[in-house]
Amino acid sequence: MTAASSALPQHFDEIYQSIPAAVTLIAVTKFLPVETIRAAYERGIRHFGESRVQEAIAKQAQLTDLPDITWHLIGHLQTNKARKAVEHFDWIHSVDSLKLAQRLDQAAQELDKLPQCCLQVKLVPDPPKHGMEAAELTELLPQFDQLVHLRLRGLMTIPPQDASPDEVRDVFAGAKDLASAINQKAFAHLHIDQLSMGMSGDYQTAIACGATMVRLGTVLFGPRPPSG
Ligand SMILES: *Cc1c(COP(=O)(O)O)cnc(C)c1O
């Protein structure tokens, strides 16, 4: 075993193996060093999540020998970084406004890319969080459907920090219902086949409720250093 892979917590493989094959495990490596990414890669992880564009770019520059990584942007994105996000990520989970989506679409056209995207939705009021409320999102769907340089195919949601287990379940079930309702509208372009939901504290519930992508940091890697 190399020094790098022995740096992962002992339970890493157990958690990894416990994720059903149909669910994509996104290893969240924000604030963690590239050595951790390499160690997880050696164990078979190919999907990595980062919350900040600049931090991810710096890490990617040190990992050019690992070309088959799929990079996921999971943190809030400012419109002025849309172009960089399209350049450096395969997936953007945090599309939380029409304006941001339009910027991403424009950048994708210019860069001749087709980034895969999730619309971030708040199923219950949660002032500190980014994301559109379900009603707002639903109203904007015809406009999202016109953004043909994006592959808008997912919903991403995060339950409120203080939610009870029942509320967490309701949020995840609500995301699944919303995806079905969107698909029933049969848009030309927009079709939801991914649910990005579940973090270290609630991923088992999320999987039971139909998550297709879970975003796990702490449970895989242990506590993160504080953000810089
Ligand atoms: C940090 C983060 C995660 C991972 O959180 P853990 O609780 O450490 O698993 C998942 N999703 C988003 C959007 C995050 O910002």
Image (cartoon, helix red, strand yellow):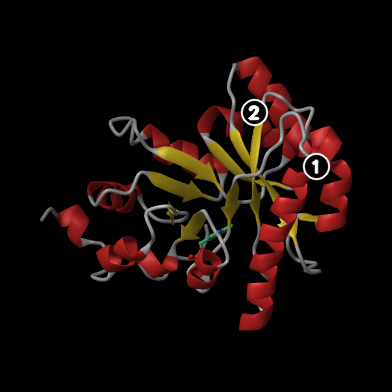
Count of numbered marks: 2
Whole-percent x, y for residue 100 in the image = 76, 38
Compare residues 160 and 168 and report the one nearer the observer. 168
> Is residue 146 at all visible to an observer of this figure?
yes
Name above or below for residue 138 compared with residue 197: above
Name above or below for residue 24 compared with residue 219: above
> Is residue 163 at all visible to an observer of this figure?
no
Whole-percent x, y for residue 207 in the image = 50, 65
Whole-percent x, y for residue 187 in the image = 77, 34
Look at the numbered disc 2 and give the secondary structure of its residue: helix
Compare residues 24 and 48 and report the one nearer the observer. 24
Tell me: 96 left or right of 222. right
Name above or below for residue 154 compared with residue 17: above
Could you tell me which residue is drawn at 36 percent across and 52 percent down?
33
Q: Quadrant of residue 123?
A: bottom right
Specify the label residue 185 is tagged with. 1
Name above or below for residue 124 compared with residue 97: below
Residue type, label 2? Arg
Whether residues under marks 1 and 2 lie with C-beta atoms below 8 angstroms apart, the answer is: no
Circle 2 is placed at which residue position? 83
Residue type, label 1? Lys
